[in-house]
Image (cartoon, rainbow, N blue to C red):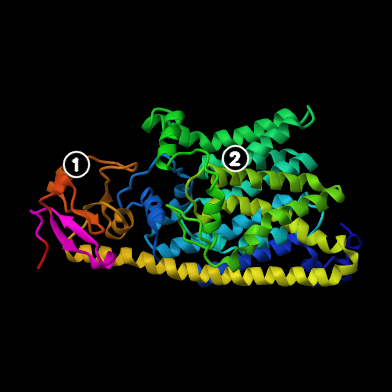
Amino acid sequence: MSTRMLPRPADRAVPKPADLIRRPAAWLVAVAVALAALEFAVVVRHGTVGWDEALYITQVSPRIPAAFFSAPRARGITYLIAPVVWVTGSVVVLRAYLAVVGAAAIVLAYTPWLAVTSRRAVVPLAALLFSGLWVTGYYVSEVIPNFWVAVGGVALAGWFARYVVTGGRGALVGVVLAGAVTTLMRPGDAFWIALPLSIAALAMRRRRRPVLIAAVLAGLALGAAQWIAEAYLRYGGPLARLSRSSAIEGGIAWHPRGLLYELSAVNGPLLCRPCGVGVQRPGLTLWWAAVPLLAAGGLVLAARARAVGPVAVAAACGVSAAVPYLLLLGYAAPRFLLPAYALLALPVAECLTRLPAAVPRLRRPLAGLIVMAVLAQLGSQGMALSRQVRENAAERRTYVRGAAALERLGLRRPCLLSGPRSVPVAFYLGCGTGEIGGVLASTTPARLLETARREPTGILSPGTPPPGYAATWVAHPLSGLGRHWRVYLPPWFAPPR
């Protein structure tokens, strides 16, 4: 090959810093890196686990017996954490792993939207708005599936919109894979996210309609296969499992106060059950009320620019994802709306990027006001994240102290715990767990008494008398768990002196 055909060094395209800044993909990566840095600075170093986390970890841990896995749960998050949990029992290492993978998931989820949004700043701004929420920062590193449903839902809607706009087999593969991941994490949430997509696919031209519907359904079926198989093995089929799930959730029915419950939980607590209607720190709740208004504004401005299609897809999926938690559930948790926040961030970002141009006379001051509002939102959410991590880490340390107190009483693995808080306390002891009654019943009094003859067994209590089958058991104070907490041990068990 002649050297004349090779470009001279001066002729080669060397990207300039200004060019990199203008690239939305680079900004999207920067948002993900910032999220990972925030996780390591604030969240990762706290090595305590909550009730749900302990339950999910025990499903794949080789060191701890698996806790009872109830009907509403799905095993997707356990597959995600399994490689780390098999290798180490360190919670800090597990959180670091989730922080890195979660940051990468932000990039993967929002990447398909880069090809379908008409303004370069929309996608990185949407990722920033979603990543900047305290509830997002908190649950990226938690062993809880809601964040992963959110990024899966964004990717699913994004690849759907990309196929509609650009076509291509790659986009269809993206629809199938994103749908499978989302469904594997939480089949119910995936159904609500995919519902508007299925309706939109029916409105497509005949040539594209069958393949789009097939891709959406294939993703749901692939992700739900394990859940369905387990339903037949343990519950008698999917309908029986759904019925059992509804009973455990308190009844999936019309709950018009669900919106007020979610509003009261915006700034915590992590679980509002039973839930009142009081709002903690109302000043930090303004953004929640602004989301539907800004999302609607984004739709209007995009429609004026004849670019409403992709934004409408994101908005429809976001609203649909929120429906079961705002209208059909009798309690609330901030994490339930993560999929809705992630999807509605796109029309909100569309509104914020188009609004200055829509008012030419106020373009500069309006743009400055938007920048200041976004920075104020990020700052306030960062402080809320720090507070939530600190408060909940302090609460979870009671589980560690309770486990230490039980260990001093002589409980060692193999052992069994029952009663409230038994799952997280047993996690630190390496014990199995079993509940006698209620919606989470997993054993019987006879089996528990039989186990107590073979291995150390305790019943945790917040100060109430022992159950009838353990009326002769001896109460021992368990101040590590709280002021009135105690553990009932069988009379034949002799604690060390």
The structure residue drawn at horizontal position 46% and vertical position 29%, both measured from the top left corner, is: 239
The CA span between labels 2 and 1 is 40 Å
Q: Which residue is mark 2?
A: 192
- From this viewpoint, is residue 168 visible? yes
The answer to whether residue 397 is above or below residue 65 is: below
The structure residue drawn at horizontal position 56% and vertical position 69%, both measured from the top left corner, is: 38
Q: Quadrant of residue 92?
A: bottom left
The quarter of the image holding the C terminus is: bottom left
21 within the magenta span: no
Q: Which residues are magenta?
A: 474-494
Foreground residue among 128 and 159: 128
Tally the numbered discs.
Answer: 2
In the rendering, at what x and y percent does residue 94 appear?
A: 45, 60
Helix, strand or loop under label 1: helix
Helix, strand or loop under label 2: helix
Q: Is residue 307 left or right of residue 192?
A: right
- From this viewpoint, is residue 16 visible? no
The structure residue drawn at horizontal position 27% and vertical position 64%, both measured from the top left corner, is: 402
Which label's residue is closer to the chain start, 2 or 1? 2
Q: Which residue is mark 1?
A: 445
480 within the magenta span: yes
The answer to whether residue 432 is above or below residue 8 is: above
Which amino acid type is marked by label 2? Trp
